[in-house]
Image: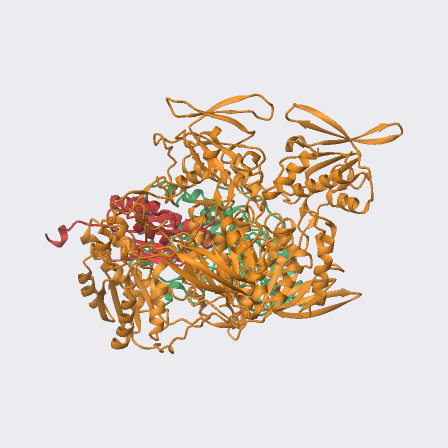
Amino acid sequence: MHNVENSIREAAKKLLSEKKVDLIVGYERGTLPLRTTPCFVDKAEDVRKLVWNENCDANLSKYLLSRKENVGVVAKGCDARSIAVCIFEKQIDKEKVVIIGAPCLGLIDKKKVKAKLDGRELLEATIEDEQIRLKGEGFELVFPKKDFICNSCLTCRHRNPPIYDVFTGEKVSEAEVDEFGEIADLEAKPAKERWEHFKEELDKCIRCYACREVCPLCYCKTCFVDQTMPIWFGKTNDLSDTMIYHLVRAFHVAGRCVDCGACSRACPMNINLREVVKKTEKIMKERYDYTAGLSLEKIPPLGEFKIDDSQEFIK
Amino acid sequence: MDKLGSVMVIGGGVAGVQASLDLADSNFKVYLVDSLPSIGGTMAQLDKTFPTNDCAMCILAPKLVAAGRHQNISLLTNANLKHVEGKAGHFKATLTRRSRRVDEDKCTGCGVCAQKCPVEALDKFNEGLSKGGAVYVRYPQAVPLIYIINKEKCLGCGICEEVCKAGAIRYDQKDEELQLDVGSIILATGFDEFDPSLKTEYGYGRHLNVVSSIEFERLLSASGPHAGLVLRPSDGDIPRKIAFIQCVGSRDATCGTDYCSSVCCMYATKEAVIAKEHMNQIEPTIFLMDVRAYGKDFDKYIERAENEYGVRFVRCRVSSIEEVPETRNLKIKYEPEDGKLIQEEFNLVVLTVGIKPSESNKELAEKLGVELDKFGFFKTQTFTPISTSKPGIFVCGVASSPKDIPETVTQASAASTGVGELLASARGTLVKKKEYPKERDVRGQPPRIGVFICHCGINIGGVIDVPSVVEYAQTLPNVVHACDNLYTCSSDTQEIVKNRIQEYGLNRVIVASCSPRTHEPLFQETIKEAGLNRYLFEMANIRDQCSWVHMHDHKAATEKAKDLMRMAVAKAREIEPLERVALGVTRRGLVIGGGLAGITAALALAKQGFEVDLIEKNKELGGFLRKIHYTLENDDTQEYLRAMIDNVYSNELIKVFLNSKVENVSGYVGNFKTTVTLDSGSEVKRELEHGIIIVATGGEEYHPNEYLYGKDHRVLTQLELENRITVAADEKFGNVVMIQCVGSRNDEHPYCSRMCCGEAVKNSLKVKEKDPEANVYVLFRDIRTYGIMEEDYKRAREAGVIFIRYEEENKPKLAKIKSEGKEDLQVSVFEPIIQEDIIIDADLLVLSAAVIPPQENGTLAKMLKVPLNEDGFFLEAHAKLRPVDFATEGIFVCGMAHSPKPIEESISQAKAAVSRACTLLTKDTIEAEGIIATVNPNRCTACELCMLVCAYNAIEIEETKRGKVAKVNSALCKGCGACAATCRCSAIDLKGFTDMQMNLIINTLR
Amino acid sequence: MKPAEKEWTPKILAFLCNWCSYAGADLAGISRMQYPPNIRVVRVPCSGRVNPYFIIKALQRGWDGVLVSGCHPGDCHYISGNLVARRRFAVLKDLLEYLGIESGRLNFSWVSAAEGEKFATVVKEVVEKVKALGPAERLVKR
């Protein structure tokens, strides 16, 4: 991990001093335990600020959208993939971005940590030897790190960025995981039960749009729910409106979503939003053998067709 | 004598219709004459078409409708030519229009007469397989949709007269005579089917379960007698084993039809595939001599039929068919290649009938003074494939020889070019431009909707409570007037509509009646005459999709009509006038490629007065044709080529760029800009402006890696042999072995090169002519001497040329055998009839090498943004009906750039491309579609997804002050709306079918 | 009879492409093929024009079923509009069903201009399916 952090700093320094980029977007230590925040470094001497650890959870590709200057960006596998999608969609200029790829073994899910704290305040956290030590007033807890890994990381098959300009550290082995295992149970249920499940889950939504704001692919100038002339769908908390909001958002990221998990992490109501979008990933894989963000040239499924595409649902 | 700017086209099949449309679109007045009561010809009878399995009616109907409503086309149906005099430039024709006993001006096509007619007559269209009345239309989508009374069947009972509320029945209507003055004539008379009862051994007419392939086609059709179910005539059972017997009336000297009908191998395979698709239990077997899948992508179709659909192909002639009395099954006796006689039982036998010259040809030829060939087709020559023996009279399609639909359509367009060249000076003199009142500006005004609800005689009114719908319409928002009419489409109601528009100040009009597909243009015309933009119109289909399909539930039908009314009003409240933008046209052409096709195209454009830039990559014109010295008919190709090249250089409208290549193309239909690089020592760049582009980049001969080619001087390609024959004075050839399909129909080039069989036959005959002692062996997989070429194949066999078939898996082998100090070439091939290898000592080994696409096609295709097929040839917009067009408007393809083909077909295609180009070049401006996509720049993120789904390259990204946004090129947009439905940001909308309108329609649910 | 007792009949919204399916529906009429009167047709130029919003909105608005019909693959008047649409519909249908919408409410077909009979059959089947499901509830905004 330190090795990666150092090599990120070196790469950043080199890029800045050689004037290849005007700015580095990376992570710096946050003020709270287990936190990092995005940071912007424009001087070579400031690269010390940059950190690399299991808490670098923000998808920084969001910060690259319609930037004018040359930018170097620190990117995990999922980040790099969403950058690739945005490059294909011409939202990020390939010529102006240098991807500093870093291998990732999984992020810490703060929500999982929080659940173990029972409302107590966390003052210090350390991670060593695959163990996480949580300290606060009058308590100290030790857990295996794997208990806190984000669900999106547990099914990740691209821990090494598939697209990068500079690679830092050593490549890690890719895990053989059941990509879509987490929704299998739900899929196997009858329609009525699925409906009840989603009803219950999405009824929690307060329409704060945090999911949309963090999503690297939600870059529409006016989101469909905010459009008038015509107003397609309402912005109310009515269950139908809410379900449709999430349905349409899932449709809009179909063939583009890289399952970075940002939406789920951002949701203040703890809705498992990945459960909705994960399905789109599966559809794309099963119907069109497509995984988003692995190439800068390949046309995404909804932008092309084959004469013999599956059509079992058409009479 | 002045030339006339009008043309008579005889025959309303797909050829006649295409020729008429091209001519009418390039400002000639057209009289389209058909002896039948409706146009559409044979193609309207087809179910699906090979090799794409397109629905024939789906693709043909729009063309028929376009011809039916074209301002420059007069349809003269149920009419025959009586007499012609005059000459090229001015013919005087007399026609007889036979009485329909129905008033064409009054009949609305509503069909009540046919429903009530008590007479059951056999339906000719369904090949006698189903029944209809004495008053009928040939097929449901007939153009013109006017009924006709069959005089033989009519009882004169008067019922139709009684039920026809339009008063269109005229029992006393007489035949009439008509005089036409035209500058030129096109013959598009099509063909007759061979009458299978003439081949008595097949038992057609005696055995119930022996049907003709045309009858079988109707059986397959969804609009056929059993709605697409394949049932055999004797007992209505599903036939499990079906035998197709090929060449019934083709390649058969005993019937005087010793030509190949060209289409039967493919259409029988198609019928077998479709039958299998309809009913999986069917097992089709096709008995044939050769698989003649010589067209573009045909071999792939055959392969799929064999491997995916399990169609069995058996090579043999069938000797007899016997009926099994108990089951009415059929026992077929045949002898496959290995000579063992086999007897097999089938449930149904389909006789694949060949093409016969139209019966009417003889009479026509006499009246017109043109020559027929020995079979009775109109006679043409290799270099003038669309000219008859008489100047000013052109011919296209099967009227001159058997051919498939794309070639027929190609020739139709080519014939139109023939007319264009002849009558260029008179173009536009006989077409009238209709004047309309100035359009009222209704933008910003609140909608004032007028609703006209049609009874359609009793078609609607007999089911739907029309007055209650009128009453209901009056309650809907913005409706200021609603009324009902007996026939809204009748000419007196059109006047009423116009008056009401004035009287009530209507600015939106709704007609609730039949289908917008047939009647929208009529009503749009009416409101345009009343000063309203044609798009301020909406229709509610309460007949075809309501009263006719819910005839027994009057209440529900009335409720549905009200809902449809409410939906129409919801949309009408949001419709806006749309503009058809007029775009300027640079009246100049660019032809890429200076071979036969390119030269032909350039000259045809120049003859019609258009300037042309002709680009050739080599240092001289001529291309592939430089290597061909004579034709099967012994024409001197080099002399022809020299004359053509002289014509090019002496024509001041043509500018030739040699050693040149296209470097960049920008712009769009009517307004292209091309950069050309000239390599003459130093590179020079030229910017050219032009309105159209014709791609004629040709083909190249494959350089074989097989059979020691290039390693032994005795191994030649067919073209090299041809050169040798031409230069050598009196050579002794000895044993000449030709191997067909070298580099064709294999994994590398999985297509047929089309011309090689003809070349081999031609050169064998020439070798035999020069050296009668020579022995010529042709080793082939299938001999594909389609059409009239079949005769030459026969001629070659008679001259002693030996043809030996080989299988792909068992290709001929070449060995070098040392004897007496020299090395002999020895070819061995497995002979399927004697089931043994035979060995031939070859003095010359001639390889029929494939025709391959030039490498540069890829780069050029990208520049033009047009597609290539898998084989690297340019891919046309539609394999059947748009054979020389690209989906991108203003760009055309011809010659071997499209696919390998012989001389006359390249010439036809080049002329066809010019005809299509002239529909644009003859206009001052091109009118864009009104219904097109439009971008809201405030929403667009320029993600380019719309560009990916646009099939017409109509969207590009533009740099604006607000950043990059998508922009729709109104000249290229066809208004499909795929972009609008794809855009996540709803930044693109489709005019005429806007999101707003769709949203309101959906919201009308009660 | 009180309104509450009135027998429910499904309302189905159909988007038909102008060139094939709408023509097929016309042909069903020309051939006087009878089918249930529960369908309301919206003519669109191409099945490619059908935005997922149209379908979702219809379900939210309370239409009991939706039918989208276009040209068979290869027949599209606009070359490939139906093929682009086919992918869009596949994803939408999979997603809607995943959320728990009854699959019988979403119907797609290819109907050519010559397939009047097929159109009538499709309508009959769709109406039967939707009748069996009962009035739309899920996703309907009350």
Q: Residue at x 88, y 27 (%)?
A: B820
Tell me residue B646's x, y (percent).
73, 63
Residue sitting nearer the eye, B610 or A296? B610
Left/right of residue B871 with respect to residue C137 in the rendered view: right
- Of the 4 image quadrants, the one containing the C terminus of chain B is bottom left
Residue sitting nearer the eye, B11 or B974? B11
Left/right of residue B1003 with respect to residue B39 in the rendered view: left
Tell me residue A31's x, y (percent).
49, 62
Colour of chain B, in one word, is: orange
Residue sitting nearer the eye, B136 or B483? B136
Residue sitting nearer the eye, A242 or B763? B763
Colour of chain C, in one word, is: red
Residue at the left extreme of this rendering: C1
Chain painted in green in the figure: A
Tell me residue B569's x, y (percent).
28, 66
Q: Is residue B312 above or below residue B964?
A: above
Q: Is residue B863 above or below residue B359?
A: below
Q: Is residue B382 visible?
A: yes
- Of the 4 image quadrants, the one containing the N terminus of chain B is bottom right
The count of marks equals 0
Tell me residue A199's x, y (percent).
31, 51
Q: Is residue B277 visible?
A: no
Left/right of residue B567 with respect to residue B326 in the rendered view: left
